[in-house]
Amino acid sequence: MRHYKKIFFLFFLITLSISSQEKVTLSGTIYDQSNNETLIGVSLYLPEINAGTTTNEYGFYSITIPEGVYKIQVNYLGYKTIIETIELNKKTTKNFNLTEETESLNEIIIESNIEKLNVKSPQMSVSKLTSKSIKQIPVVLGEADIIKSLILLPGVTSAGEGASGFNVRGGAADQNLILLDEAIVFNSSHLFGFFSVFNPDVIKDVQLYKGGIPAKYGGRLSSVLDIYQKEGNSKEFNLTGGIGLISSRLLAEGPIEKEKSSFVIAGRASYAHLFLPLFDNENKAYFYDLNSKVNYRFNDKNNLFLSTYFGKDVFGVSDNFVNTYGNAVVNLRWNHLFSDKIFSNLSLIYSDYFYGLTLDFVGFEWDSGITNFNLKYDFKHYLTDNFKLSYGINNIYINFNPGKIVPNREDSGILPEQLTNKYANEFAAYLDAEHKINDKLTLQYGARFSNFLRLGQDELNIYEDNKPVIYNQQFKKYESATTTGIENFKRSDVISNFNNIEPRVSLAYLLNNETSFKMSYNRMVQYLHLLSNTASPTPLDVWAPSGKYIQPQQLDQFAVGYFKSIKNGSYTIETEAFYKDIKNRIDYINGANLIANNEIETVILNGQARAYGLEFLLKKNEGNFKGWLAYTLSRSEQKTPGLTTNEPGINQGQWYNTAYDKTHDISINASYKLSKKWTFNTNFLFQTGQPTNYPVGQYEIQGLNVPIYDDNRRNADRLPAYHRLDVSATLTPEKNKNRKWQAEWIFGIYNLYGRQNAASINFRQNRETLRNEAIQTSIFGVVPSVTYNFKF
C-alpha cells in the first residue's frame, strides 16, 4: 500500500510544480454553427509553439501557455477550418462556432482523424465514428448500423450473419463495455443481431477503444465502445428520418429556450411482420426503440442533461412461443466548470436489461434480467499544455435476476419458481495523467483501483471441499457436485470481497512530424460474466457476478504500433501488434446446462485465454475517391487445466481455438463521388471460418445413425471461409439546393454475388436415403434494398 501512496504523492508534487508556473489559460467550448451542438474531439492547434489540445466529450477545451500573440487553427473533419490571431495576456474564455463544408444529412461515417496532433497523442488502438454518413456503407436490408461498420475495422469481427454482438482482438462479446451516454448497455442487438440498438440519426460521436484503454474505463477486458447522443438543435426545429423496406426512423429536435435549452427525440420501428399474415404466416419478429435527450445551459459553468433510451424486441412462433428482450437506460448529468482548468461531470445512471419467454404449449412464462444503479463523478484538470490530469470515482450497485418461472394457465402443471437473485457492488477510483515530456515523447499513465463486493443472497450452496465441480475417475468426465448444505445471508452481508489495482500506461514517440511509434500496456479486471456456450450471445444468456466459486477475469494487454501520415494526411498508415493474456476465463464442462440452472457454479471451470495478432490499416482520406484497406492476422485460444494434477481438464488441458478465433480478417471499403448527384460505395469482407466441431464417427441405435463427437477436440474444425461483396449508390436530387426539404435515395445490394455463407453445419441421417449428410444453414443470399432519407 505504501508503494501506491508514493505514486499518488509523486502526482501531487508534479501537479504542484507545474501549476506554480506563470502562464495564461485559454479555454472555452466549440459548437456547430448550424445547431449549437457541442463538438467532440475538435483540434485546436498553435503552430508557433507546436502545441494544441482537443475538446472533451462535452465540447470543452483548455490550454495553458506563455503570454503572447498566437495564430490559432481550429480543425474538425467535415467542417471549415478556423484560423484566427489572438493576443493572450490574461486568462481568456473564447468559444468557437464551426460551419460544415457542405450541407448534408446527419448520418454516420468512419472518420479518419488526419490532424498531426493525433500522431503525437499517446492514445492508440482507437477507432472514431462521428455523425456524418454511415449510410454510405452498404449494409443488410438498407438499415444503417454502427456495429456492422465496426466489423470493417481491423481487430473487430462478428460471429457471422444474424449473430449478436461483436468480438475485439480475439475477445468474447461479453468482454466489451458498451456505453450509451455513459450508461451500460448489456445487449447491443435487435432481432438477434440483424440490427444494432443504436439509431444512427441520434448518435453524435462514437469511439471504440481496443487497447491502451484510459483508466476511467473498467469492468470489461476487450474493448470500450463509448457512444454519445446528440443534444438537440437549440436554434431551430428540425425533422430527420428515413423510410426503408422493413423499418423507418423519425427524429425531432429543437429549442426549448433558444440557444440555451434544447431537446431531441427519436423513434425507430420495424414493420415487416405486418405483412406476414398476407402469406398465412402467424410468426412475428419486430423491434422498436426510443431515444430522448434534453439539456439546459444555466450559464457558462453549469449544464444539465437528461438522456434516455428504451428498446424492445419481440420474436414469436405463432402464439405458442414468444421471446421478448430489451434495454432501458436513464442518465441525469451535471457539467460544472470549477475554473478554466477544472471540468467536472456528475452522473446518476439507471440501466436495465430484461429478457423473457412465453411458452404457451408448455404453460409458463420466464422472466429474467440485470439492473444496475451507477453514480460517477469525473474530473478533467488542465494544468498546463504539457500536463493534464483525469480523475474520478464510480460506484455501481447491481441486481441479478437469473430467472423466474410463472405458470400462465391453471392446467399447466408448472409450479412457480424463482432462481436465487444475486447482488453486488462495484466501486472504482482512478487517476490518469497525460504528460508531454518533450517535443518527441508524450506519456499517458495512471491507475484504477477497483473493489467488488458480492453481497448477501437468500441461499448459497455449500460443497465438499468448496468444489462445485468434481472429476469422475470411473467415467473420465467432469460432473456437478452434490450440495452438502445451504448458507443464508442478509442483504448487507459480504460473501466475497475482491480488490485490484489496474495500471495503465502508453507512450508516443515522434520520429518526425508525420510519423510516430507508440506502445501501451493496460490491466483490466472484469467481475461480471456472461454465461453462454454459444459463439454469439442470445437473449437467454445469463449474467453472473464473481463470488465464492467464480473468480474475476484479469487481462494484461501489450501493444506496439507504427503510425504515419502521408501527403499532409491525405493517406494514413496504422500498424499495431498486440498480445493479450487473460486469467480466470470461464469454461464449461461437457454437457453443461446453462438455462434455468440455480447451481451454475457446478458446470463451469476457471481457465485462461490468450490472443495475439497484427493489425494493418491503410486509409485514403481526401478526394472524390476515399476508402481503406484493413487486415488482421490473429489467434485467440483458451486453456483449462484440471483442478488437480490427476485431472485432464478441458480438451486434455491443451490450448484450443475459442469460438471467435478468426486467423485472417480482410476488409475493403471504398466510396467514389461521381457528381453532386451520385455517390457510389462498396465493401468487401473475408474472414477465416468460425471454429466448430465435426463428428469423428457414428453409432447405430434402432436403425438410426447417431454422430459421435470427440470431447477432447474442442473447436478443432472450422466452417467454410466467410466472404461477401456489398454495393450501394446514393442519389441526391438537384432540387435539394436552396430549399428547406433535403432528401436522398440509397439503393443497395448486400452480398452481390450471392455467397451462401455458413452460419452453421449440422450432421444428420437423411430419413429417405438413410445416408448421413451435412446440412449447411445460411442466413442471407442476395439482398437488395432501397431507403429514402429526409431532413427539414
Image: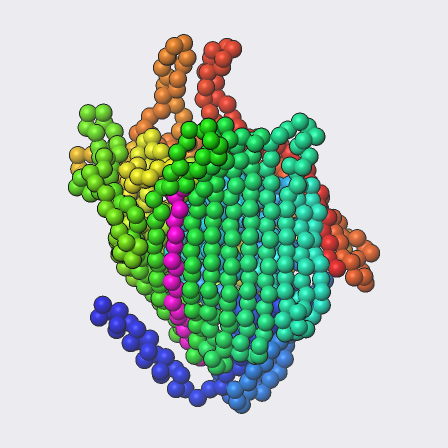
Q: Which residues are magenta?
A: 384-403
What's the residue at 41%, 86% (across, down)? 21
Q: To which quarter of the image does residue 517 belong? A: bottom left
293 vs 212, left or right, is right
Instruction: For the C terminus, give its image quadrant.
Output: bottom right
What's the residue at 40%, 14% (across, down)? 705
What's the residue at 67%, 37% (across, down)? 274
Asked if one can make out residue 128 in the rendered structure from this viewpoint, the answer is: no
Residue 1 at x, y = what percent? 22, 68
Asked if one can make out residue 380 in the rendered structure from this viewpoint, the answer is: yes
What's the residue at 63%, 74% (across, down)? 260
402 in the magenta segment: yes
Q: 126 or 375, which lies in front? A: 375
Residue 331 at x, y = what percent? 51, 62
Specify the farthest residue to the front: 410
Residue 398 at x, y = what percent? 38, 54
